[in-house]
Amino acid sequence: MMDAVQKFKKEFGYTPVGQVIAPGRLELLGNHTDYNQGLVMALAVDRVLQIAFAPRQDGRIELVSTGYPGKEIFSRSRIKKNPECEWANYLKGVLIQLQDRGVYFGGFNAAVHGTIPAGAGLSSSAALEMATALAIRRMYPFVLTDSGSMRLNEASHPPDFKERILLAKLCRDAENQFVGVQCGLLDPLSSIFGRANQAICIDCLHETVEHFPFIGEVAVIICNSGVTHHLNDGSYNQLRDYCRNAAKKLQVTSLRKMDLSTLKKRKGNLFHREYDCALHVVSEIQRVIFGEKALEEGNLEQFGQYMLQSHESSRDLFRNSCRELDTLVALARNKNGCYGARLTGGGFGGATINLVERKHLGDFMDGMAQDYQHAVGFDPDPQIIQIVEGAGDIDRMPRILTRQSGIVTKPSDQRWVLDEL
Ligand code: GLA
C-alpha cells in the first residue's frame, strides 16, 4: 500500500513540503476515567497516522486518503460536514477549532495514510486530529496560548509542555463539537505526550503528565475481538451522561472528588446505572494509583491483577464490554506468562491489551489465535506493540523506532517493527 507521500505525489503531481506523524494509543489502565477528571495510564503505539502536506495560495483545501476513495475539496472559509466523506470530519473539526482560536491558515493539499485499524480502540481519530493540528502549525506557524494563539513569522519550534496540553484540548474540542463524541483528553494527550518505551500517566484534574519506564521482560500484545464499534453511535455519550448525572446528584464537580465509602452511603440517591457507573469510575481511579505504585516497584504480577480487575469492573459495572472481549480476556488470563488482560478504550468491541512475559510470547500468540478462532470463529490476529514517541515531524520516527530494537522500520507497512519473535 502507498504511504502518505506516495499518495500525495500521485494525487497532486508533486512532492509535499512536509510530513507529520501521530501515534495511536493503548489505554493501559483507567477505563472511562478521563472525562471524570480521573487518572489514566496509556502507551503511544507504533500504529500511526501520517499526513503529507503542502500549502496553496488560493484558500482551497484538498484532502485525499489512502484508506478511502475520492478527494474532499472545500474552501477554508466554508468548512462543513460532508456525509459522503466522514473521515474528513476529524480534520475539519480541528480546522474550525484553530479558526476559533484565531489561528490563520490558508489553503493546502494533504494526503492521509494510517496504520491504526479503525474501531479497534486504538484511537485513530485522535491521531488524525493531532496530525492535522501539527500539519497546520508547520505550514502556517503559530503558538497556542491560554487566550487563543499567536502567529509566527518563522517556523515554529516543537510545542512545549503547556502548548501540547492546549493542542490536546483543541483536538478534544474538535471531537466533542464537530464529530459529536463527548470523549475526554486521554487520546490526544497520549498521542502528543508519547515516549518510546515509557507509559504515560495522566492526571485529568490537574492536567499533568508523567512518564514511567515500561520495558523489560514483558511485551504488549493486542488481540482483535473482530467487533467493530464506533463511538459516535451514542453509547459512549450515554455512559458519560450516567457519570455526569451521578456526580451532580452526589453534589461533586466530578467523580474524581468522590470516595468509595461516601459513594456507598449515598447509593440511594442514584439510579441503578448511575451508581454502577460511579462505582466503576471511583474504584478504577484507585486502581490507577495502585497500578502506578506496582509499576514503580517493578511488580508486574500485581499490575496485571489490576488490569484484570479493571476488565471485570468494565464488564459488570460499567457494562461497556461484550461477549467477544470477555472471551479474549478469559482465554488470555489462563495462558502461561500472561500478567494481565483487559479491554482498552471506549469498549463495546475493538481490541484487548495483554501483558505477556517475553519468553512465553510465541505460545501465547499461537494459543490465543487458535482458541479464539475455535470459540468465536474469528482470527484475533495477536500482534506485538512497540511503545513510541509522541506526534511530531516524521523524520523523527525511524530514529526512535530503531533506538531500542535496531530493526529497520517501514512506516507504510502494517507490521513494521513487529517481528521480534
Ligand atoms: C475513548 C475516548 C477516551 C476515553 C476512553 C475510555 O477512547 O475517546 O476519551 O474516555 O474511550 O477510557
Image (cartoon, rainbow, N blue to C red):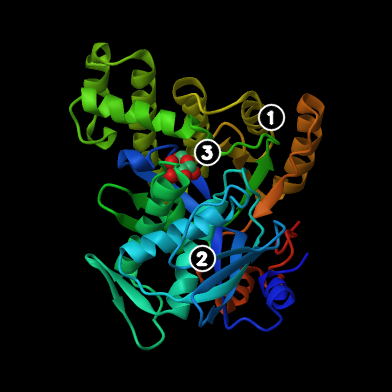
Residue 331, numbered circle? 1
Secondary structure beneath dot 1 equals helix
The quadrant the N terminus occupies is bottom right
Judge whether 417 appears above or below 184 on screen. Answer: below
Tell me residue 68's x, y (percent).
70, 56
Determine contact: label 3, label 1, CB under 8 Å.
no
Q: Distance of mark 2 from mark 1, alpha carbons?
A: 36 Å
| Quarter of image, res 33 | top left
Q: Look at mark 2 in the image and give the residue it sits on.
A: 131
Name the foreground residue: 131 vs 73.
73
Residue 231, numbered circle? 3
In-image side of 134 versus 274 (left or right):
right
Please report whichever mark, 3 or 2, sits nearer to the chain's N-terminal start. Answer: 2
Tell me residue 356's x, y (percent).
63, 45
Name the foreground residue: 371 vs 293.
371
Give the residue type at disc 2.
Ala
Residue 73, numbered circle? none
In-image side of 100 versus 412 (left or right):
left
- Report if residue 100 is visible in the image: yes
Give the residue type at disc 3.
Leu
Q: Residues within 10 Å of mark 2 (few under 14, many from 20)?
A: many
